Image: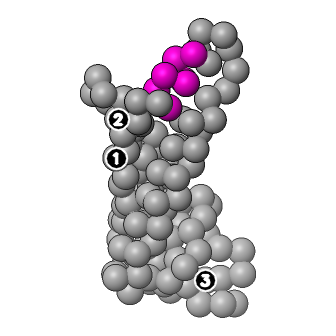
Amino acid sequence: MISVTTPTLENGVIVEYKGLVTGEVVAGVDFIKDIGASFRNFIGGRSSGYESELEDARIKAVQEMEVRAAKMGANAVVGVDIDYETFGNAGMLMVSATGTAVVVKNK
């Protein structure tokens, strides 16, 4: 399964559109990472704990989207958009990946 942000694939022809497909992940950041991020916010610098959490959530959201696309009979996802949100007072992170599931044939 290939997922791209572009509306087409360079060496492929879209022969069928299966529809909108999404993958979502909601993740909580643990207490230790939250303390580390607060400390980094105070002194400056990057929060590797949050960055790692975001990366893991992004990978899982894209994988979930691809699994759903495959169940629809697609072999690719085009026009992929990834969104990040925070919500709640508990430091919850949500990552969603959305695209169009398609069937692609090689040129």
Q: Amino acid at mark 3?
A: Val
* Residue corresponding to mark 3: 13
* Residue corresponding to mark 2: 92
Count the marks: how many?
3
Which of pointers 3 and 1 indicates the residue nearer the eye?
1
Quadrant location of the N terminus in the rendered image: bottom right
Q: Is residue 36 magenta?
A: yes
x 62%, y 18%: residue: 40
Residue 57: percent from left, percent from top: 47, 51
Q: Amino acid at mark 2?
A: Met
How crowded pointer 1 is (Cα within 10 Å; few <14, some 14-19, many 20+) is rated as some
* Residue corresponding to mark 1: 26
Q: Is residue 12 above or below residue 3?
A: below
Question: Do callouts 2 and 1 mark residues in contact (Cβ within 8 Å)?
Answer: yes
Instruction: Answer with left or right where residue 47 lies relative to residue 38.
Output: right
Q: Earlier in the sequence, mark 3 or mark 1?
A: 3
The answer to whether residue 85 is visible is no
Q: Is residue 81 magenta?
A: no
Give the residues drawn in magenta, as a range. 33-39
Which of pointers 3 and 2 indicates the residue nearer the eye?
2
Furthest residue in direction top, as rendered: 42
Q: Nearer the viewer, residue 86 or 105?
A: 86
**Element assignment for label 1:** strand
**Where, by quadrant of the figure, is residue 20 drawn?**
bottom left
Instruction: Answer with left or right where residue 6 lies relative to residue 31.
Output: right
Residue 10: percent from left, percent from top: 71, 74
Secondary structure, magenta segment, majority class: helix
